[in-house]
Image: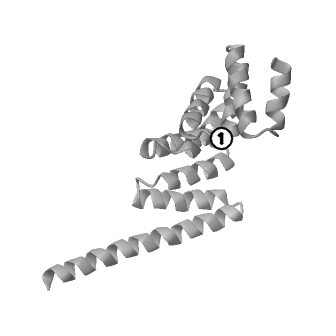
Amino acid sequence: MRYLLSFSILISTLTYGQTQRTILYAQATEFGYRNQFKESEGVLSQIIVLHPKDSLAYFDRAIMRENLGDTIGAISDLTKAIEIDPKSADNFFLRGMLYKNSTKYKDALSDFQMVNRLDHGNADAHFFAAQMEFTLNKNKFKVNRELKRCLKINPEHVEAKSLLERHE
């Protein structure tokens, strides 16, 4: 009987915690849809306090922080998300975009290359890797290789076609 009661308490605690998380995510999402980024960031911070290993909360908070103009905070959140879930191509892709927009091209290139290792079907990651190689005046062969990989995945990728024409 004692074990059954303990098990019931454990299940209700886990269920309550999951329900609370679900409610908080719904609130954060609603704030985000209303462009209330500061409020959404606050709710996501609550989720992180309650569930510090929730990489999705860090990813979502990074988006809110970037919308608030806090690129450094967004990169920090994505770095934490990557630490928690190092196999998520989405975390690397978004951080690569933030590095690119912050003119940290070497860091961006590294993240886009990681996306390409994790997700072979991401045409944009190949394109942005090529763009970073081009910007950093890297090897022409590497630029063309990434552009051709991009176009193999998405033959209609207009930006890749344009860069390849300029670079050949």
Image location of residue 147, percent across then percent down? 73, 28
Note whether residue 134 is visible. yes
Q: Quadrant of residue 14?
A: bottom left
Amino acid on which the number 1 mark rests in the picture: Asn
Residue found 70% across the figure and 26% down from its top:
130
Q: How many marks?
A: 1
Residue furthest out toward the front: 152
Residue furthest out toward the left: 2
Image location of residue 61, percent across then percent down? 57, 52
Q: Is residue 67 left or right of residue 116?
A: right
Q: Is residue 57 left or right of residue 158?
A: left
Q: Is residue 76 left or right of residue 149?
A: left
Circle 1 sits in a helix, a strand or a loop, which is it? loop
Residue found 56% across the figure and 43% down from its top:
89
User: Which residue in the protein does label 1 denote?
Assistant: 122
Label 1 packing within 10 angstroms: few (<14), some (14-19), many (20+): some
Image location of residue 120, percent across then percent down? 60, 38
Between residue 15 and residue 76, name the one nearer to us: 15
Residue found 53% across the figure and 59% down from its top:
44
Q: Quadrant of residue 34?
A: bottom right
Q: The C terminus is located in which quarter?
A: top right
Residue 92 position (above or below residue 146): below
Image location of residue 123, percent across then percent down? 70, 38
Between residue 15 and residue 65, name the one nearer to us: 15
Q: Is residue 40 left or right of residue 1?
A: right
Between residue 168 and residue 134, name the one nearer to us: 168
Colour scheme of the rendered structure: one colour
Residue found 63% across the figure and 26% down from its top:
104
